Image (cartoon, grey):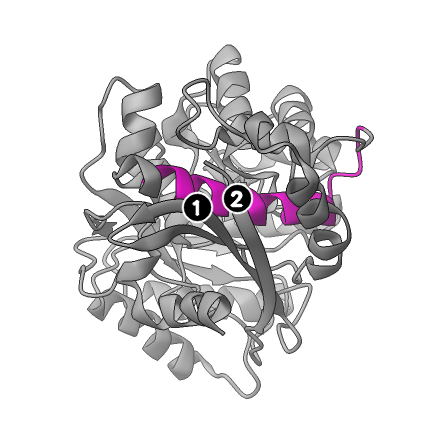
Amino acid sequence: MRIVDIRETVVPIKSQIRNAFIDFSQMTVSVLGLVTDVLRDGKPVVGFGFNSNGRYAPSGLLRDRFIPRLKAADSRALLNDAGDNLDPARVWDVLMRNEKPGGHGERSVAVGVVDMAVWDAVAKIAGVPLYRFLADRYRGGAVNAKVFVYAAGGYYYPDKDLTALQKEMSGYLDLGYSVVKMKIGGAPLAEDLRRIEAVLKILKTPDQLAVDANGRFDLEVAIAYARALAPYKLRWYEEPGDPLDYDLQAKLAPHYLGPMATGENLFSLQDARNLIRYAGLRSDRDVLQFDCALSYGLVEYLRILDMLKEHDWSPARCIPHGGHQMSLNIAAGLGLGGNESYPGIFQPFGGFADGIPVEDSYVRLPDIPGIGFEAKNELFRVMKGLIEG
């Protein structure tokens, strides 16, 4: 078998929302289709991928380096030993040829786009959902029949008052979510506390709410927020400081005994290992949010999970950022602790398969080959247009 074509396009997901650091008025996503010569029902198997939200489309890197590199490769170097399917690790090695160590930024996003498309194609060629493929290969066939998901929102909108914030969060509860997350750090501490208390009024318990500072704080402000947040006993306090400032995270930990979360802006095994080594995180309560679609894909994520095991961290402490179907498959197939969800934003990329309800913050996956994009109509319309256009 071989890859016969690779196509990429840029799709806007712009929005007026903002977090503590950026607005999303110009945000874009790369969508990639990887066409193989394998036929199913008379049609070529196509694997699809895209980058997770929060990073702009890495279109230039894909078109200038990674797609040409993959097209130029000997097709046999991309296959498994049987020669009947792609080998994601071998594809990854080809993509990373002539790439120096370090530089884990936009490059990791571009590779993650291709990697997602490869895994989608691999599972489709095998004729099974990706979560089943992963469970059979890495977990003795054990699949999590349903996956914990939480609704991420609570962004800062123009003229958004407390009533509007409560209405947004109530909408997530009505959709079946019992855990929600909101942004902090984009307003003064006193205002953020009023926002938190407004949301808590509509929840049954405080551990239904997590808060996310998006790396906004220096150590002094992070500690001030920690002291103010501690009495609420929230689900977690997320990314208080710069994601690479491990010393800040370590110094903050004694001031906040409740769970903290971070990792969504770390894009490599090396950065993830340094986080575990130096950031003072606690394996009994803290949450790791590495997003495979931003960090060289699932091939690299598997290496991160191996590293975590060496440091006595359970995969159940991993709840990936991004709210996409790729991470949902990984959570179900590899036993992660859950997945983020964006039920109302970043469409059509946010959210999961159509017609499958969220029940008490758990969701099931469709029983179709691949990642399951075909079960999300608005998203698959974009993907199909890339191949048929």
> Looking at the image, which is closer to me, 203 or 288?
288
Q: Judge whether residue 110 is colored magenta.
A: yes
Query: What secondary structure is found at the residue carrying circle 2?
Result: strand
Q: Quadrant of the N terminus?
A: top left
Q: Residue 272: give x, y in percent of width and height.
A: 62, 29
Question: Which residues fall within the magenta stretch?
Answer: 101-123
Residue 37's disc number: 1
Amino acid at circle 1: Asp
Q: How many other residues sit within 10 Å of disc 2, few (<14), some (14-19) or many (≥20)?
A: some
Amino acid at circle 2: Ile
Picture layout, residue 27 above or below residue 211: below
User: Are discs 2 and 1 less than 8 Å apart at CB?
Assistant: yes
Q: Judge whether residue 114 is colored magenta.
A: yes
Q: Residue 246: give x, y in percent of width and height.
A: 71, 32
> Looking at the image, which is closer to me, 97 or 71?
71
Query: What secondary structure is found at the residue carrying circle 1?
Result: strand
- Residue bearing mark 2: 3
Whether residue 314 is visible: yes
Whether residue 335 is visible: no
Mark earlier in primary sequence (2, 1): 2
Picture residue at 56% right of the left edge, 27% below the top: 76
Q: Residue 234: give x, y in percent of width and height.
A: 40, 48
Q: CA distance from mark 2 to mark 1?
A: 6 Å
Relative placement, left or right, of 376 versus 214 is left
